[in-house]
Amino acid sequence: MAKLKIRLAKTDDSLSMAEILREIGWSEKRNNMPLEEVANPIKELINHCNEDPNGHTMIVAVDENNEVIGFTTVHWVPFVMLGSWEGYISDVFVSPSASGKGAGSALVKYVMEQGENRGCMRLMLTNGKEKPSYQSGFYKKMGWTERPKVANFVYYYREPWS
Ligand SMILES: CC(C)(COP(=O)(O)OP(=O)(O)OC[C@H]1O[C@@H](n2cnc3c(N)ncnc32)[C@H](O)[C@@H]1OP(=O)(O)O)[C@@H](O)C(=O)NCCC(=O)NCCS
């Protein structure tokens, strides 16, 4: 994409990020909430990440009009078993209207470079197997490996956006 920029997320980006989640439409409940209500917790998360840059990096992709078209977050995890660090990527989202133009790959590649610069041993993320991103090999094309022997467990305190 022409003039695509990657930069750290700012508090003011929360509405655009909420709008992107709404456009993607994974949660009917979230899509029926006022945008501000979706954006408020995102604002807090942006502030948290920016106050602890050694622990987290939240970045956005902006287009030539300075519109936020995508975002991702990586958490730098001290990992005793590895004797090193793992970067855990928790969100990779690009507005469907800007999809297919390289923003998603640019965000992930930025994180890959950051991890290398920080001397991390590896990066990790989850990707729903029914999602087009998984089926189109989005991560594999960038050199990521799917782990055949590892199950992904979660423990819920509450359902997200249920
Ligand atoms: C996955 C996602 C971030 C990709 O962003 P993007 O900006 O569209 O990706 P890119 O333009 O960099 O595309 C990279 C490659 O992945 C493929 N791809 C990515 N998303 C795809 C999708 N939804 N459907 C089909 N192919 C897709 C593209 O075809 C492209 O392959 P190519 O280079 O061989 O043509 C975006 O589609 C998205 O936000 N999806 C919903 C959320 C999601 O699934 N996130 C990832 C898992 S957490």
Image: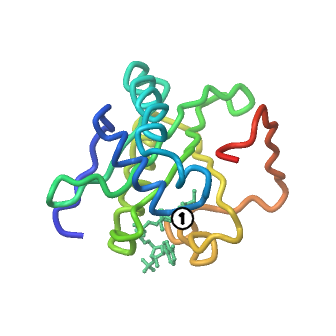
Q: Residue at x 63, y 76 (%)?
A: 135
Lateral position of residue 52 relative to residue 81, left or right: left
- Measured from the top left, where is residue 52 in percent x and y? 43, 20
Answer above or below: position of 98 versus 36. Answer: below
Residue 80, relative to residue 92: is it above or below? Answer: above
Q: Amino acid at mark 1?
A: Gly
**Count of numbered badges drawn on the protein:** 1
Quarter of the image where one finds residue 67 = bottom left
76, 157: nearer the viewer:
157
146 or 125: which is nearer to us?
A: 125
| Quadrant (top left/top right/bottom left/bottom right) for the N terminus | bottom left
**In the rendered image, which residue does mark 1 sit on?**
143
Viewer-side residue, 161 vs 87: 161
Q: Residue at x 70, y 71 (%)?
A: 130
What residue is shown at x 75% (from left), y 58% (from top)? 147
Up the image or down, 52 lies above or below 161; here it is above
Query: Mark 1: few, some, or many residues within 10 Å (few <14, many ≥20)?
Result: few
Q: Position of residue 75 (x, y in %)?
A: 53, 34
Instruction: Residue 95 in the image: state x and y as whole percent.
Output: 39, 63
Query: Residue 117 placed where, x, y %?
Result: 40, 38
* Residue at the image point whose x is 40% and y is 31% from the top: 43
Tell me, what colour scheme is on the image? rainbow
Judge from the rendering whether residue 25 lies leftward or rightward of residue 153; answer left or right. Answer: left
Residue furthest top in the image: 51
Residue pushed farthest bottom?
136
**Which element type, helix, strand or loop, lies under badge 1?**
loop
Q: Is mark 1 within 8 Å of ligand 1?
A: no
